[in-house]
Amino acid sequence: MSMSTSTEVIAHHWAFAIFLIVAIGLCCLMLVGGWFLGGRARARHKNVPFESGIDSVGTARLRLSAKFYLVAMFFVIFDVEALYLFAWSTSIRESGWVGFVEAAIFIFVLLAGLVYLARIGALDWTPARSRRERMNLETNSIANRQR
């Protein structure tokens, strides 16, 4: 590497090097500033979380139903669907009818999945109650037919 090419490389990347130095320096400054300005008291009571003046009751570990996680996954799936459709809608002119048909198929497949989930009861929060209601409806309809 000759002297002129190394000078050219330095001249070409000086702005990025200054950016890195400033970013790292700013992070270090904030960490050191927090350490200097922060409190030094180490007591058992200091580590207890303060929530609006109300003492904490119980543990922070909650046992949630598996249904909660199932609904969270459904939300993520349909949120990503909205993201894809938004990206498609920004390029609708470039994609033309082919893109429209592909988006329609995409929406149809997701709606078919949603209908399937609703039919198997995956979206019911209380499946035992739903089964009881369905059984009551069936027994009522059978009783009405026999009359």
Image (cartoon, helix red, strand yellow):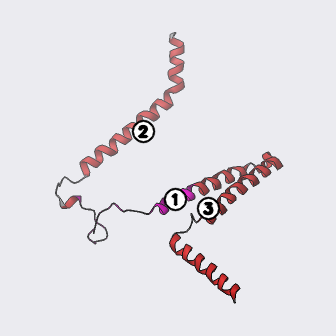
Q: Earlier in the sequence, mark 3 or mark 1?
A: 1
Q: Are marks 3 and 1 in contact (CB under 8 Å)?
A: no
Query: CA gap, disc 2 to disc 1?
Result: 41 Å
Task: Estimate how packed mark 2 is, as few (under 14), some (14 to 19) or many (20 or more) residues with alpha carbons within 10 Å.
Answer: few
Question: Which label's residue is closer to the chain start, 2 or 1?
Answer: 2
Where's residue 145, x and y in %? 70, 85
Circle 3: residue type = Leu
* Residue located beneath label 2 in the image: 23
SS class, disc 1: helix
Q: Residue furthest right?
A: 97
Q: Which of 120 and 78 lies nearest the eye of the viewer?
A: 120
Amino acid type for the residue under numbered disc 1: Leu
In the rendering, at what x and y percent does residue 41 appear?
Answer: 17, 55
Q: Looking at the image, which is closer to me, 114 or 139? A: 139
For label 3, the SS is helix
- Report crowding for label 1: few under 14, some 14 to 19, many 20 or more residues within 10 A (C-alpha): few
- Please provide percent x and percent y for residue 64: 41, 63
- Residue 61: image x %, image y %? 33, 60
Our reading of the magenta stretch's main secondary structure is loop
- Residue 4 is covered by the magenta coloring: no
The dot on residue 117 is 3
* Residue at 69% across, 60% down: 111
Q: Residue at horizontal 34%, vertical 45%?
A: 30
Return the residue found at the far bottom: 147
Closer to viewer: mark 3 or mark 2: 3
Figure quadrant of residue 146: bottom right
- The reply, left or right, for residue 96 in relation to residue 61 is right
Horizontally, residue 145 falls left or right of residue 130, namely right
Return the residue at label 1.
Answer: 70
Q: Residue at x 49, y 27 (%)?
A: 14
The part of the chain drawn in magenta is: 47-76
